Structures are given as structure tokens and as C-alpha cells.
Image: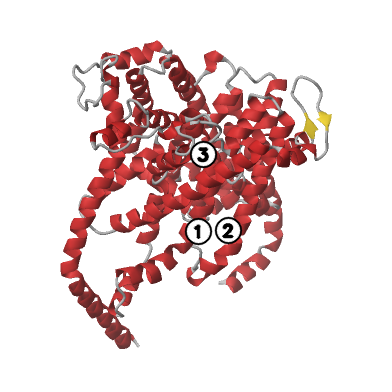
Amino acid sequence: MSANAEAGDLLVKRRSMAAQHAFGGRRRWLHFTLYVIFSLGSLMYLLPLAWMISTSLKLDGRELAMPPQWFPDPVVWKNYATALTALPMLWFLRNTLIVTVTSTCLGLVSASLAGYAFARLRFPGRNMLFSFCLATLMLPSIVTMIPEFVLFKQIGWLGTFLPLIVPWSLGGHAFGIFLFRQYAMTIPLDYDEAARIDGAGALRIWWEIILPLSRPVLATMALLAFIYHWNDFLRPLVFLTDKDLRTLAIGLRLFKSEYLVQWNLLMAASALMLAPIVVLFFAAQRYFVQGIVMSGLKR
Amino acid sequence: MAATTAITARALARPRRRLLTGQAIEGYLCIAPWLIGFVCFVAGPMIAALIISFTDWSMLSAPEWVGLGNYAKLFEDPLFYNVLFNTAFISFISVPLQLGLALLMAIGLNEKLKGLAFFRTIFFLPSQMPVVASALLWLWVFNPEFGLINAGLNTLNLPVFRWLFDPDLAKPSIVLITLWGGIGTPLIIFLAGLQGIPESLHEAAAIDGAGALARFRHVTLPMLSPIIFFNLIIGVVASFQAYFTLVFVTTGGGPGNATLIFILYIYFKAFRDFAMGYAAALAWLLFMIVVALTAINFGLARFWVHYEGGDAA
């Protein structure tokens, strides 16, 4: 039996060596071609971004020069300061942070609670409720926004941040619930049972055992929620009827209509909005990738 | 295994039952925040939207019941057919192109080669950017007078175009932007999927004389098909919503309604014209389309999706 398996193994190994040998020469060509193709491709992906930075550092009017200059002369760093003050970008940033931080934090609490329950507690209707939760991922949010608008108007929430904060704080990130559930299912149930014997209830188990063990998935959830709120456009556009409440995304759009000709300032403002995401991206690329992989590989 | 569980379950039957009720209460308690949110901001509004769709309502006066009137009106609205066409054009071209391009890139990036991780980062980055910022950037790149693309074409003595401002080119231009910004996510997913394909399968096929193309067709594609399929549904459904910001900021639905897509039309009807009833009918129709597309996709999946040992990826 085992000798047979060994012989089989050997056969596979020899075969794979033979296959690699056959590839050898062609592989090198293939790799060279790949480098060339990917270099050209990534150049195409980077060009618009380089163009953005280049434009953002140009003197007023120079950005309209034809043919365009790639390297601005002089380099006008002041455009960034102007972009910050020309529209109250710092104020928009404050608004964005209020919405982003509160919804992300409260959302983590409610999503991890629900994810924990869906993964580890037994209750009637659990699977049905979880499939409802997953179904909301497919739902175009505009369908609910019309009645929500009416509702928020009636209860006086228009003109506050509540329409953006409350739904997300109440487990609105269905995807986060899904992520947390998947992760919590991998933690051995023995922990819960041991804690139960010590008299701990579900809430204490969630807080003292599950949450500390779930830091990686919490980081992924926090990151995804942060990016979502930072980039969110449609809901703030509809629900933030008050000028003072505008978030960065909405403010930037506004900047376009008011300063349509000043592309250097507009690009500086765009680059400023993009900067935190790029920094986060390079600092935590692993968590980005993790979240996305879990979203795309079914179950 | 199953037998052990059964024995344990029987042995613990009495205390377990009591535990279950306790756990059930705890379970409901834990999902309560989500459940409240779900009822108030998802399920409730869904039903409310359906009811509103049977009325004529401007929010200024009381809603007036019109039955299926709004849905009947849809078919007489010439703009509506335009909107359907635009949405189908943009989503059905952009999403398969994104997936195809991402798949090719992923296969290349899956080679064990130094420096390829760097390329992965570059292709992935645009997908995480705030859409408002990248939409403004592309508006500038496509600018007919001073934009990068026309400047390049000019240098090469090629004809220049008005891109986003040309009724015929606006939709393809939007698709082009989505190829830049939308490829990162499927790329990462395909890469993860490719890493799950056992090397031995490729080698066995190679020994049997399969060339690169044959291996792609008979090994890679079948092994990845569940992932491709899943991302096709997700991608198309998501594109109905996700392209709102891009289109709203770049063209606003123009020129001459050439890029007026479904979600933008709903937005204008609801929050510019305050035709709440008509907008709700449109929104529900969009929802039905999403459900139908998902169902059709699942129906067609049997014919081309290959599940390894009944286990979905």
C-alpha cells in the first residue's frame, strides 16, 4: 500500500521535473514578455495619477498650456494650501470624520455582535435571518432611500448627521456581519463552553473571548467601513441637505462647479482627499486584500 | 462522528433544551441592533417604497393612489428606454471586460516572478480611491481642449475627440474609466483563486501534451469558473449602483442623456423632480431586474460553472 503510494509520488515528481525542463527555455521568454507587458500596463495605470500631481503643482493658467508640461516650473506647493482654504475643506474633513468614526465604531460593535450570534448561538430562525442579512448585499440602496428620505424628513433628521450614522451603526454593514461570522466560526466552541461552565453569558463571551481573538477581522471590517464612509457619495448627497454638514466627497464635487476652470486647485483638492487612502493602503494592504478575497470567494 | 453527536445530544437532551432557550434569548439580544436596523432601514423602507410606487406623490400634497399607473407610465416614457439601453450598454460591456482583463492579468501575475507584487499593487490601487476624486481626475484627463489624452493624440498627429462630451463616445469613455478603477477587486480575487488551483493539475495536463492555451481552457477556466461566475453577478449588480458617483460627477447623465443610467434617473426623478411615486416604481423595477439577473445567472451557471466535488470554491 504505502510502497505503492511512494512509487506514485516518485512518478509525479519525475513527471513534474520533466515538465519543468520542457518549459525551461520558453519560460524565460515568457517572463521577459510578462515584465514588458506589465511595465507598460502599470505605466498606463499610473499616468493619470502622475498627471493629477503634476497639474496640482502648476501655476494658475499653466495647466492649460499646450503641449502640456509634465514637470511644473515653478512648482507651486501653495496650491495645496489654497485648496484647503478656498473651500472649507478642513470643515468638510471634520464632518467626514464625525460620520466616519462614529459609524465605523458603532458599526463594529453591532456587526460583531450579530456575526457572533449568527456563528455561535443557536436560536430559531437564525439561518433565515442570516440569509436576509446576506440578501441586503444585493439590494440597490436607492430602493430604500426614497422612503428613508420621507422618514428622516418626518422625524426631523434631515439637516443632521443621523441619517448617515444611525443605519450603519445598527449593523448596516451587512458585509461586516458576514466577515465576522465567517471568522468567528473558526474559533473552537470549547472556549464558549468552558466560559459557560464558569457562568459567563453570551455578552461576556463575546466581549472577553471572541472579540480579543478576532482582531484581524475587526481590522479588516474597520478598514472597509472607513473607506466606505470616506468615499460615500450618494447618501450624503441626498440626506445632508444642510450646507454646513457637507462631507469631503460632496464638497469636492461642489468645488468643481465653482472653480471649473481652476484645474490645478481641483487636482490639489482631489489629491488631498486621496492621500489618506493611499497612506492607509500601503500601511495595511494585507487587510484590504483579505476583505476583498473574502468578498469574492463564495463562502 | 454523526453517531457520537447523536448520542451526546440524547444524553444532554434535558439540560440542553433549557440551555437552548437561554441561548435563543441571548441570540436575539445579540442580533437586536442589526435586526432593528434591518427592519427600520431595509425591510420597512422596501415595503414603503412598494406602496409609494402605487401613488402619485410630490411630497407637497397628500399622496394620491394610482394603482399600477406609474408602472404603466414607464412604458410610455421614451426616456426610460434610453435609460435601459444606457445602463445595459455600460454595465454589460464594462463588467465582462473588467473580469476578462483582470483574469488575464491575474494569470500573468500568478507566475512566480520577482517584482510582480509591485505591479499588483499598482493595478489594485485605483479601485480603492474615492470615486469623486478619480472622476474629477478623469474629467480632466478627457478634457477636450487641455486634457492629457487629446494632448497625446495631438502630438502623434492623430484626430482628437470630445470624449465624455461627445454623445457617441460618452458611454465608451465611461467604460474606459471603469476599466481603470474597477479592475483591482476582481484581480485580487482571481489571484487568490489561482493560488488555490493545485500545481499538479497543470503539470499533469502539460505531460499529457496540453499547450498553454489548452491548459488555460481545460484546467484554469473550469477551476476558476465558480469564482468568475460569482463575480459576474456581484459585478453587474454592483455596477448598477456603483457607477452613480462616476457618472454624476463626470457627465451628469449627458450629453443629451447619453449616459443617463438607471440609478441616476431614479435619483433625478426622486430628489430633483420629487416625483416620489414614479421614482419608487423605477426603484422597484431596478430591484426586480437585479433579482431576475441573479436568478438567470444561477440558472445558466449549471452549463458552465464547474464545482469541484460539489464544493463551491
Crowd tier of the residue under label 2, counting other residues whose Cα lies within 10 Å: few below 14, some 14–19, many 20 or above: some
Q: Earlier in the sequence, mark 1 or mark 3?
A: 1
Q: In x, y percent, where is residue A298?
A: 50, 56
Letter of the chain that mark 3 sits on in the rendering: B
Q: In x, y percent, where is residue B255?
A: 51, 31
Q: CA distance from mark 1 to mark 3?
A: 19 Å
Q: Amino acid at mark 2?
A: Asn
Is A259 on the left or on the right of B284, as rendered?
Answer: left
Residue at horizontal 50 percent and vertical 58 percent from the top: B229
Q: Are marks 2 and 1 in contact (CB under 8 Å)?
A: yes
Q: Secondary structure at mark 2?
A: helix
Residue at horizontal 64 percent and vertical 25 percent from the top: B271
User: Which residue does the numbered mark 2 point to in the structure image?
Assistant: B297
Q: Nearer the viewer, residue B43 or B101?
A: B101
Q: Earlier in the sequence, mark 3 or mark 2?
A: 3
Up-down: is B167 above or below A127? Answer: above
Crowd tier of the residue under label 3, counting other residues whose Cα lies within 10 Å: few below 14, some 14–19, many 20 or above: some
Q: CA distance from mark 2 to mark 1?
A: 8 Å
Chosen colour scheme: secondary structure
Residue at horizontal 63 percent and vertical 57 percent from the top: B295
Q: Which mark is residue B242?
A: 3
User: Which residue does the numbered mark 1 point to in the structure image?
Assistant: B229
Circle count:
3
Q: Secondary structure at mark 3?
A: helix
Asked if residue A181 shows in the view, the reply is: no
